[in-house]
Amino acid sequence: MRARYGSFRILGLIFLVFGLKGAEALQPLPPEPLYEWKPGTPDGLGKWFLGREIAHYMSHQGAPWLERPEREEEERTSLVLPALALRPGDRVADVGAGSGYFTWRMAKAVGPAGRVYANDIQPEMLAILSTNVAANGVTNVVPVLGSTTDPKLPTNALDLVLLVDVYHELDHPFEMTQAIVQSLKPGGRLVLVEFRGEEKWVPIKPLHKMTEAQVKRELALHPLDWVETLKVLPRQHILIFRRRP
């Protein structure tokens, strides 16, 4: 009996060890080395991720540029939300929401039964956002002060997370994307809007543009499937990914 009990105990330990390893395997493994530090450009951090130099993020002092009157004419921003087909009652997030340009528009799209988590790492931006949200008469927005590695969003709760001209400025893109994926419901969508790096004529500094191939390369490290890339905007991609079940 003692020998049989000992055998069962050993088998139990083996299953425990392999079970833990299996759970760890569900988490994406970062590339090695995760980040590199080397000389770059004045617009970048000198910090590189998978061959891409990360750009400086926009200070709250740049908020007027986000709200410039000519933005619709230049970027056709009014085409973004219809392309995403948000539904009444959806729970969504605007990560790197800035002045709230898309936040209050998303809030109207999901309606009173829905909710928008407006994330930023700058309290000053969230103050500007809250003013703009109130001015547009929506009450279903939750401002969220995040960190550079964690947007502080609810877990397994969101139908969609939107980043507009933000991803290229994340100074910890692997960790932030990992946290964002954890906030999505299985089947939830992650959407990046980025100026097209393939086209030199797009009048944006090179580090503030991304190619479709580079976005796919970086997001392939996570449990996400690329769904489609929409090219309805004159200067930007709309890249849509879905969290695996």
Image (cartoon, rainbow, N blue to C red):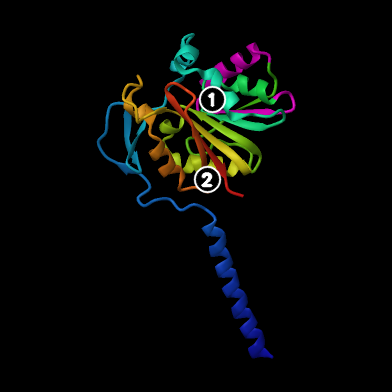
Q: Position of residue 75 (x, y in %)?
A: 46, 18
Please rate how many residues cluster around mark 1, counting C-alpha atoms within 10 Å: few if below 14, some from 14 to 19, many from 20: many
Asked whether 134 falls inside the magenta stretch, the response is yes
Magenta-drawn segment = 111-137
Q: Quadrant of residue 187?
A: top right
Q: Is residue 182 left or right of residue 216?
A: right
Q: Can see residue 64?
A: no
Q: Which mark is residue 97?
A: 1
Please rate how many residues cluster around mark 2, counting C-alpha atoms within 10 Å: few if below 14, some from 14 to 19, many from 20: some
Q: Quadrant of residue 181?
A: top right
Dot 2 amino acid type: Asp
Q: Is residue 156 left or right of residue 179?
A: right
Whether residue 128 is situated above or below residue 173 in the rendered picture: above
Q: Circle 2 sits on which residue?
A: 225
Instruction: Name the residue at 46% across, 46% down.
Output: 220
Q: Position of residue 63 (x, y in %)?
A: 47, 16
